[in-house]
């Protein structure tokens, strides 16, 4: 059957009309990854963003943390909770604002995409710590924002969902591959372009643009494989709702490259499930 491909240029043009991830995220990420930075460096960056500061203090003073004293400054929050936790909270908050809406084209209810994204980021962090890799904040952020392309793609996917689903079911291709066939671009590729347009590093753009490991070079990249594996673990646990018959195509290659055993996967799942209630609680305060 002949199929007319959508014009991807129309989709790409939507990037300029879409509210970007706040620049403060880039600044925080750069400082967190810089070994010369201090806790006060990151705290000062946050303090100069009044909206971020207000939101962060609200979360820190919520029942989620149950601290015995009220926190009145970002510096105080950093001392009590630690730099890593403050960076994570900032990233969670920014992701929440962008990802909380329903994505009908992907059959995701309101709040579902942000829950998936936060879950994948937490698992990515666990894998990165287990493997003792550098750039842990970059990987955490890449995992958190990996599906940001869906925010623009979803209405185009909704218009073409029957054809996309036909390719997935009849021709046994991945949902992303079907997206690209029908629309001329997939959400990973668009997400990578969004990161580039918003001034994120080439490394971040590469990981997000390749997080389903469709490109051979991505399957040899440790950091991209970590983000892929975290999302796959979410799928195995039923956190990701979308059904993709080819979602696990590169699972064996990823775990082999990362030297992750079945036992390691089981431990990662158990650890996450033991803390799953914390994700639900955090979402109420973001």
Image (tube, rainbow, N blue to C red):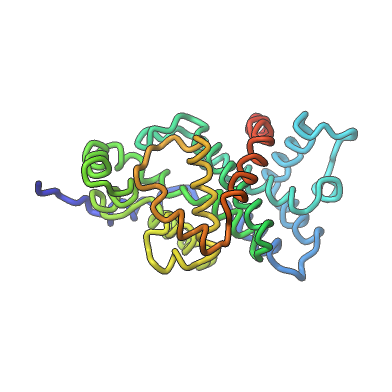
Q: Position of residue 47 (x, y in %)?
A: 75, 51
Q: Position of residue 167 (x, y in %)?
A: 23, 44
Nearest the camera: 2 or 236?
A: 236
* Looking at the image, residue 124 lies above or below residue 234: below
In the image, is 98 to the left or to the right of 9? right
Task: Look at the image and tell me whether residue 248 can be seen.
Answer: yes
Residue at the image point whose x is 52% and y is 42% from the top: 234
Q: How many marks?
A: 0
Nearest the camera: 173 or 13?
A: 173
In the image, is 154 to the left or to the right of 77? left
* Looking at the image, residue 15 lies above or below residue 61: below
Residue at the image point whose x is 42% and y is 56% from the top: 250
Task: Look at the image and tell me whether residue 160 can be seen.
Answer: no
Residue at the image point whose x is 80% and y is 58% from the top: 39
Nearest the camera: 21 or 145?
A: 145
Which image quadrant: the C terminus? top right
In the image, is 76 to the left or to the right of 85? right
Residue at the image point whose x is 22% and y is 46% from the top: 171
* Looking at the image, residue 101 lies above or below residue 121: above
Residue furthest right as drawn: 69
Q: Position of residue 224 (x, y in %)?
A: 51, 61
Image quadrant where residue 115 sits: top right
């Amino acid at each position: 059957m002949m199929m007319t491909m959508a014009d991807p240029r129309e989709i790409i043009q939507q990037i300029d009309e879409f509210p970007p991830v706040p620049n403060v995220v880039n600044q925080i990420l750069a400082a967190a990854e810089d070994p010369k930075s201090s806790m006060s460096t990151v705290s000062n960056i946050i303090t100069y963003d009044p909206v971020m500061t207000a939101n962060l203090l609200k979360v820190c003073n919520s029942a989620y943390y149950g601290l015995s004293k009220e926190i009145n400054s970002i510096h105080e929050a950093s001392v009590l909770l630690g730099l890593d936790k403050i960076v994570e909270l900032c990233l969670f908050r920014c992701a929440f604002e962008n990802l909380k809406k329903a994505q009908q084209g992907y059959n995701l209810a309101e709040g579902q995409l942000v829950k998936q994204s936060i879950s994948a980021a937490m698992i990515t962090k666990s894998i990165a710590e287990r493997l003792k890799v550098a750039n842990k904040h970059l990987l955490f952020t890449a995992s958190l924002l990996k599906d940001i392309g869906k925010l623009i793609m979803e209405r185009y996917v909704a218009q073409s969902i029957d054809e996309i689903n036909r390719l997935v079911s009849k021709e046994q291709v991945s949902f992303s591959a079907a997206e690209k066939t029908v629309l001329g671009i997939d959400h990973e590729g668009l997400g990578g372009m969004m990161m580039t347009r918003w001034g994120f590093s080439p490394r971040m753009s590469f990981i997000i643009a390749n997080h389903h490991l469709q490109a051979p070079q991505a399957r040899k990249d440790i950091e991209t494989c970590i983000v892929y594996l975290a999302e796959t673990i979410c799928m195995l646990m039923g956190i990701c709702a979308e059904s993709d018959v080819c979602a696990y195509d590169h699972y064996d290659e990823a775990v082999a490259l990362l030297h992750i055993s079945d036992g390691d996967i089981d431990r990662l799942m158990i650890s996450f499930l033991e803390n799953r209630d914390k994700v639900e609680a955090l979402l109420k305060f973001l």
